[in-house]
Amino acid sequence: MQKPNKEEQLIAEINALPEGKNFKKIAEKVIADERITDEEGILLFDKASLGLTAILANYIREKKHGDKTFFNRNFHIEPTNVCVFSCKFCSYSRLYAHRDEGWALSKEQMMDIVKSYDGIPVTEVHIVGGVHPKMNLDFFCDFISQIKQHRPQLHVKGFTAVELDYMFRKAKLSVKEGMKKLHDAGLQSMPGGGAEIFDPEIRKQICEDKVDAEGWLKIHEEAHLLGMHTNATMLYGHIENYGHRIDHMSRLRNLQDKTNGFNTFIPLKFRNKNNDMSNVPESSIIEDMKMYAVARIYMDNFPHLKAYWPMLGRQNAQLSLSFGVDDIDGTIDDSTKIYSMAGSEEQSPKMSTDELVMLISQAGRKAVERDTLYNEVVQF
C-alpha cells in the first residue's frame, strides 16, 4: 500500500478532528500556497482548536525549512534604560525625569562590551534601549563607526523605529535622510521592536506618545529601500482582541508584499510584572502557542517565525517549534534586561551554543547556526 504524501496526510489529520470540516477550505489554501483572508485568520483564533492550528502551522514550517531550527551567536548592548516615553506595559525604562534610577552608557563603555567579545565567534551585535535625549543621531553614528573600525565583520543590528523616529525628529532630518546617515555609518539591519499593536485606539491606551503605526512602517520601508533587512514584532496578550492582531499582521504582510525586506516575524508575549498594566492577566501557554501557529499560517510571505526564548522561557520556546516556529533567536548574553525586568521566565538570559543546540535537538529538530540574514554558518 502506497504511503500517503504530506498533503494527503495533512487533509486526513484535519478531517479526523471534530471541527475539521469547518476548516477544509483553509487547509486547501495552505496546501496550494494561497493566502488566507483576514476573516479566516480571525476564525482560526476564535474557533480552531490548538491541535488544528498546530497541524497547519507545522506543515508550512516543514515545507519552508524542514526540521531546521535557526539561531545565531549574538550579544546585546543596551545603551540606556532612560526614556522620554512612558509606555504602560514597559517594566524596563525609567523616565528621563527620574534618570537617577537608570543607566546610560558612554561610547567608551559600550566599546568595552564590544571588545570583550574579541576572539569569540559572535556574528552580530544587537543595540536597542530606551530613548535618551542626549544620545542623539550623531552619538550613535559615531559609535557604530567605531564598532565597524574595530571589528568590520561584526554585523550591526540596531534601534527600534521608536528610537529612530525620535533621533530623526531631533536632528531635523527626514526618515530617508536619517536612515541613509545610519546606513553610511555602518548600520546593517534593524530589530522589530516598538511595533506593539498598530491599532490607534489600543496604541492610545498603552503607548500614546511614541511613533504611530504609519511612522513605524515608514521607517522600516525606508530601511528596506536602502537594501537593509529588518524584523517585525507584535506585542500580544494584553487588551487587544483577535481583530487587532490580524489588522497588525495584515499591515506587515502588505509592506512585505511591497518591499520583501522583513526577515522574520516575532510575536512578543506581554509580561505584567513591575509596570502600569500589572492588573492585566498574562496569556496562557495555550494562547501563546496558538498565536505562533496562526501567525505562521497568516504571514505567508515572511520566511521565518521567531520565538524569543528569553521572553517565552526555554521550555516554552522548545514547545513552539511544533507550532510553526523555526528560529529561537541567539545565544544572547545576560546583559539583556528588557524582559527579565517584566517577569519573564528567564531572569539571567544567557545560553551557550551547546545548550541551544541541545534544546533544539531535544525537540526533534536540526540546529543550524545562521548569520543575521539567515545565511547558514554551521549545521549541527
Image: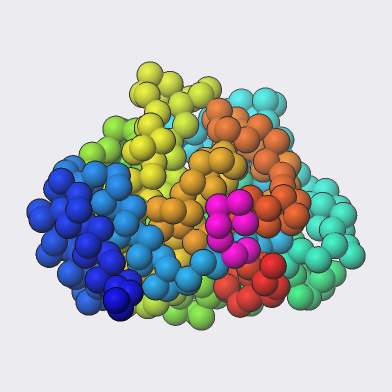
Residue 365 is inside the magenta segment? yes
Q: Quadrant of residue 127?
A: bottom right
Query: Residue 365's spot in the image, x, y percent?
Result: 56, 61
Residue located 43% across and 21% down the image: 278
Q: In the image, which residues are magenta?
A: 361-367
> Where, quadrant-wise, is the C terminus in this rendering?
bottom right
Toward the top, the furthest residue is 279
Query: Residue 183's spot in the image, x, y percent?
Result: 60, 74
> With 90 as the anchor, is 48 left or right in this view?
left
Whether residue 357 is visible, yes or no, is yes
* Depicted 114 relative to depicted 129: above or below: below
Query: Residue 45's spot in the image, x, y percent?
Result: 23, 46
Residue located 25% across and 58% down the image: 13
* Depicted 165 relative to depicted 100: above or below: below
Residue located 24% across and 44% down the image: 49
Whether residue 159 is visible, yes or no, is no
> With 357 as the anchor, is 9 left or right in this view?
left
Q: Quadrant of residue 118?
A: bottom right
The answer to which of 295 and 324 lies nearer the viewer is 324
